[in-house]
Image (spheres, rainbow, N blue to C red):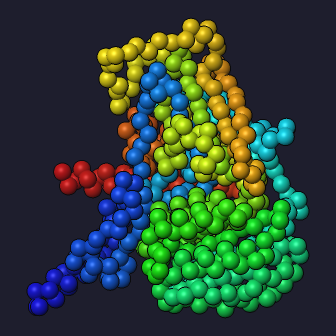
């Protein structure tokens, strides 16, 4: 027994050291192949998990997209992603003095945190689509192809009536300054934006769930604020029962043709009742067919369950945000309110067909957990990403032109029983790729198909738009944070210079803040590199 006590003391003495080394080794990373099976803790982990400040944050493992040969794999298919959580979570780590875990960095979410000045829709479709081909900043022999989508703008006054249910986690794990107090202030900001025709109910959950405020008119702001002020943390976390109650309340007050949405605020640490991610996803998939969307606001540190919350929002036809401070809450719930709560298109899927006469290889930057099978593009039963009013979506492909030395990637073996020949038309057309896009109306079940082609003309990086260069700098930032094997000779200084020169108009200071984040990341990366070299 005395040896167990001695071991306990030694492990507690090391806990602060483990906490200070906030690399991916301190965070549970779930492999997608593991089907979210629980990770069995060792005796040491059980002891440490009771120590103050032990970190049990969880992130899905992300395997970086490789280059693919266009002749063998001409199609690239994925669903859009307009979540912003990875960006603000990355900012949280940097502001707290460390690099984020590699798997906390989703490049597409970093890029799509920012708004870009893309052309607005001019026809019956709720968004416009454009492409741009530019020299790749980190490899001038390659091209960088940008796909940009711009959703139609809707003012707050133009929004249909909203039937909102605030689903608030008040369990014991939320009893921290950056959780429940931030949650209270965040939802008070949203309450200020409500109109008389809007309605809000508040459901809370801890050891059990309850209706704190029945569905109430937007005129009754004082009543809502009093209910929010009354929130107290305590108990275990019965997330599933809270979700069920929230859907029931939303159904009872469903507004036909309106905006029906649950907004879940939590650290994701569900531990009572249905608590596995797969079971929660199945529960939400059943409910979304009723026309009620579910968005997630993540909060807190230490026990944050990023992987779970991302999947809940994705399968609830909603968006996922992380609130690291009140300014981010104001951005999500006030400045970008129409994007946050009003969907203009759902199940948006893209499929790019590359012309192998012009493109030797290609690689999609980010979107690793949004990749679809090629046949799922035409399958309207397959759920995908949703687009809010005014949202912009950006995706980059790095392209190796024909005639350029190919990138050493997962090469394709020589075929024994067949030859693949180009259609003569592929050589003749001046087309780099064809982009197909499918989407459904928010209340629809059948998708519409749009198709666009992109020519082979390449713009020099110096003549490209500020938006292109800034978005490319964010992509480069993400590649460096993730230690991408395809970042080549890219440096933090190059990313900083590109972002600074392409800052453009920055009324809210978001781009200036990003440039500061580059400097922080550079400093922490150099420190870590120095420690590693000293150890060797």
Residue at 64% over, 80% down: 245
Residue 142 location, x and y as percent?
50, 24
Query: In screen coordinates, is 29 left or right of 333?
Result: left
Residue 103 location, x and y as percent?
42, 55
- Of 325 and 128, which appears nearest the observer? 128
- Of 263 and 467, which appears nearest the observer? 263
- Of 462 and 487, which appears nearest the observer? 487
Residue 328 location, x and y as percent?
64, 66
Q: Is residue 317 above or below residue 303?
A: above
Residue at 38% over, 71% down: 56
Query: In screen coordinates, is 425 left or right of 173?
Result: right
Q: In which quarter of the image is the N terminus?
A: bottom left
Residue at 32% over, 23% down: 413
Q: Can residue 244 be seen in this view?
A: yes
Residue at 43% over, 31% down: 67
Residue 250 location, x and y as percent?
72, 74
Q: Quadrant of residue 20?
A: bottom left
Q: How many marks?
A: 0
Q: In this view, does 176 lie above or below 305?
A: below
Q: Quadrant of residue 358?
A: top right
- Of 245 and 227, which appears nearest the observer? 245
Q: In this view, does 49 lie above or below 529?
A: below
Q: Is residue 321 visible?
A: no
Q: In this view, does 279 lie above or below 503?
A: below
Query: In screen coordinates, is 410 left or right of 241?
Result: left
């Amino acid at each position: 027994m005395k040896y167990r006590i001695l071991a306990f003391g030694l492990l507690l003495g090391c806990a602060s050291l483990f906490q200070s080394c906030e690399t991916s080794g301190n965070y549970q990373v779930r492999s997608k192949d593991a089907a979210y099976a629980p990770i069995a803790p060792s005796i040491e982990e059980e002891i440490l998990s009771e120590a103050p400040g032990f970190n049990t944050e969880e992130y899905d493992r992300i395997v970086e997209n490789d280059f693919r040969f266009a002749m063998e794999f001409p199609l690239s298919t994925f669903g859009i992603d307009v979540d912003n959580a990875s960006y603000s979570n990355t900012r949280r780590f940097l502001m707290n003095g460390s690099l984020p875990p590699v798997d906390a960095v989703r490049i597409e979410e970093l890029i799509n945190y920012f708004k870009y000045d893309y052309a607005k829709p001019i026809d019956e479709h709720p968004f416009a689509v454009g492409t741009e081909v530019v020299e790749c900043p980190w490899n001038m022999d390659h091209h960088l192809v940008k796909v940009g989508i711009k959703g139609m703008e809707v003012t707050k006054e133009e929004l249909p009536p909203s039937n909102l249910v605030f689903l608030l986690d008040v369990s014991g794990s939320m009893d921290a300054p950056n959780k429940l107090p931030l949650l209270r202030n965040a939802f008070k900001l949203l309450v200020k934006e409500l109109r008389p025709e809007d309605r809000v109910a508040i459901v809370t959950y801890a050891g059990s769930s309850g209706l704190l405020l029945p569905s109430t008119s937007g005129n009754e702001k004082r009543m809502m604020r009093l209910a929010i002020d009354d929130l107290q943390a305590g108990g275990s976390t019965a997330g599933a029962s809270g979700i069920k109650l929230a859907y029931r309340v939303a159904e009872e007050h469903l507004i036909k043709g309106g905006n029906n949405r649950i907004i879940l605020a939590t650290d994701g640490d569900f531990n009572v009742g249905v608590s596995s991610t797969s079971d929660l996803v199945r529960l939400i998939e059943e409910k979304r067919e009723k026309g009620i969307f579910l968005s997630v606001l993540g909060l807190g540190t230490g026990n944050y369950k990023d992987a779970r919350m991302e999947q809940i929002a994705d399968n609830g036809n909603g968006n996922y945000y992380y609130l690291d401070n009140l300014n981010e809450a104001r951005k999500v719930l006030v400045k970008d309110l129409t994007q946050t709560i009003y969907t203009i298109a759902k199940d948006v899927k893209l499929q790019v067909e590359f012309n192998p006469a012009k493109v030797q290889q290609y690689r999609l930057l980010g979107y690793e957990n949004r990749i679809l099978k090629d046949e799922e593009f035409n399958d309207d039963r397959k759920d995908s990403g949703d687009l809010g009013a005014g949202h912009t979506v950006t995706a980059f492909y790095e392209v190796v032109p024909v005639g350029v030395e190919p990138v050493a990637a997962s090469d394709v073996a020589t075929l024994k029983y067949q030859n693949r020949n180009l259609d003569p038309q592929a050589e003749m057309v001046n087309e780099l790729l064809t982009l197909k896009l499918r989407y459904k109306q928010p209340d629809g079940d059948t998708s519409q198909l749009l198709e666009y082609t992109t020519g082979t003309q390449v713009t020099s990086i110096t003549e490209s738009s500020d938006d292109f260069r800034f978005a490319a700098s964010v992509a480069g930032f993400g590649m460096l944070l993730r230690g991408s094997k395809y970042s080549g000779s890219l440096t933090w200084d190059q990313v900083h210079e590109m972002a600074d020169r392409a800052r453009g108009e920055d009324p809210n200071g978001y781009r200036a803040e990003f440039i500061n984040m580059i400097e922080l990341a550079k400093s922490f990366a150099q420190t870590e590199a120095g420690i590693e070299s000293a150890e060797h």
